[in-house]
Image (cartoon, rainbow, N blue to C red):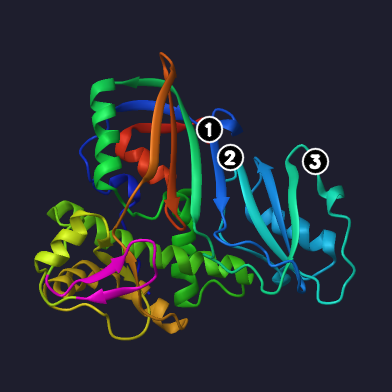
Amino acid sequence: MSAVTWRRLEHMPLAHGGAAGSGLIRSRAEDFQVHEQLGFAPDGEGEHVFVQIRKRDTNTIWLSRQLARHAGVPLRDVSYAGLKDRHALTTQWFSIRLAGRPEPEWSTLESPQIQLLQVARHRRKLKTGALRGNRFGLRVRALQADLGALQQRLAQLRQQGMPNYFGEQRFGHDYANLEQAQALFDGSLGRVERKLRGLFISAARSQLFNEVLAARIAQGNWNQPLAGEHMKLAGSRSGFAIEEPDAEVLRRCREMDIHPSGPLWGRGRPSISRAALALETAVLEPHAGLRNGLEHVGLEQERRPLRIAVDALEWSFPDSDSLWLEFSLPAGSYATVLLRELLTVESAAMS
């Protein structure tokens, strides 16, 4: 596979104009809080144990390995709905398939980094993406901003939503996951652990989506339906194709009930046509290697909203040089993408 230069998120366009200032995030774990909203309650019986854990400065994959070791099960029997930030204070659910094994003493897992909140039985494992969403609490320190412009931008996000880019954490440090995906697809990577393989494949899929969204933002139609568009229903995996955006579709789109969509690449015919298909074909033509690789590993074509609503967005200024944000996003969407619409931020945890 020939190497293709891809754009990093930092070089992709913003939807609501330039940043209104700058700041520092992740000075401490409490500055970046994520609370997983499961959307259902464990039913109280079955071979899967659901544990809710509050973790500090700990990554999800490492913690899943600790759970597997603690329960005496293979790593494949530990599941989670999604990866959570390492440099943060996060509340997350895991499921562990015991299948007749004795239940361990979960409380002995606790440490300064791990706090056990709930344990319950369920008949099915926790699947990737099986969340209603996440509630965030973020503090930006060393804030230097035009407060009027910043609050105007916050109001825009509350009213108009945000672009649904995949965040940079999807691609790994220095975009290494995307480089590994290319090596996987051209056969030079060799054998790799299943979960890491999934991360590399997801990075490739995410990059293609981001390329399309960036092009739509540059053209000014990321939040408007094109002819032949596939519209996604807000808060649902369902959607429908349109020939032309009629008055009803335009109204529902303005009211954030439906959203234009972009590709999650895989095998099969795309569910778009006309202007939407022409745009995506042109944008993704240079990325045939990633497209072919994703088809070869057996993924099917799917669609993801180009835009999402920012629910219950609230903000305050606890002191003269800090901003506190609270908001909810659907599963698979990124708080860091919202932040980049507001401010140019550096992460203290990464410096």
The residue that label 1 is drawn on is 26
Which three-letter amino acid code belongs to the residue tagged 1? Answer: Arg
Labels 3 and 1 touching (C-beta < 8 A): no
Query: What residue is at 77 percent from the left and 71 percent from the top?
Result: 74
Which three-letter amino acid code belongs to the residue tagged 2? Answer: His
Which three-letter amino acid code belongs to the residue tagged 3? Answer: Ser
Q: Where, by quadrant of the figure, is residue 263 drawn? A: bottom left
Q: Secondary structure at mark 1?
A: loop
Q: Position of residue 184 (x, y in %)?
A: 50, 73
Sequence order check: which comes first, mark 3 or mark 1? 1
Can residue 143 be seen at all in this image of the molecule? yes
Q: Around disc 1, counting alpha carbons within 10 Å, would you say few (fewer than 14), some (14 to 19), or many (20 or more)?
A: many
Q: Position of residue 115 (x, y in %)?
A: 74, 43
Q: Where, by quadrant of the figure, is residue 203 drawn? A: bottom left
Between the C-alphas of marks 3 and 2, the distance is 16 Å
The residue that label 3 is drawn on is 111
Sequence order check: which comes first, mark 3 or mark 2? 2
As rendered, which of 80 and 251 lies closer to the eye?
251
Q: Secondary structure at mark 2?
A: loop
Between the C-alphas of marks 3 and 1, the distance is 21 Å
Q: Where does the magenta region start and end?
A: 227-241
Is 279 on the left-hand or right-hand side of 123?
Answer: left
Name the quadrant of the N terminus. Answer: bottom left
Q: Position of residue 173 (x, y in %)?
A: 50, 49
Q: Which mark is residue 155?
A: none
Q: Around disc 3, counting alpha carbons within 10 Å, would you say few (fewer than 14), some (14 to 19), or many (20 or more)?
A: few
- Considering every residue shown, the one lying at the far top of the view is 320
Q: Around disc 2, counting alpha carbons within 10 Å, would you say few (fewer than 14), some (14 to 19), or many (20 or more)?
A: many
Between the C-alphas of marks 2 and 1, the distance is 7 Å
The residue that label 2 is drawn on is 87
Residue 147: in magenta span: no
Labels 2 and 1 touching (C-beta < 8 A): yes
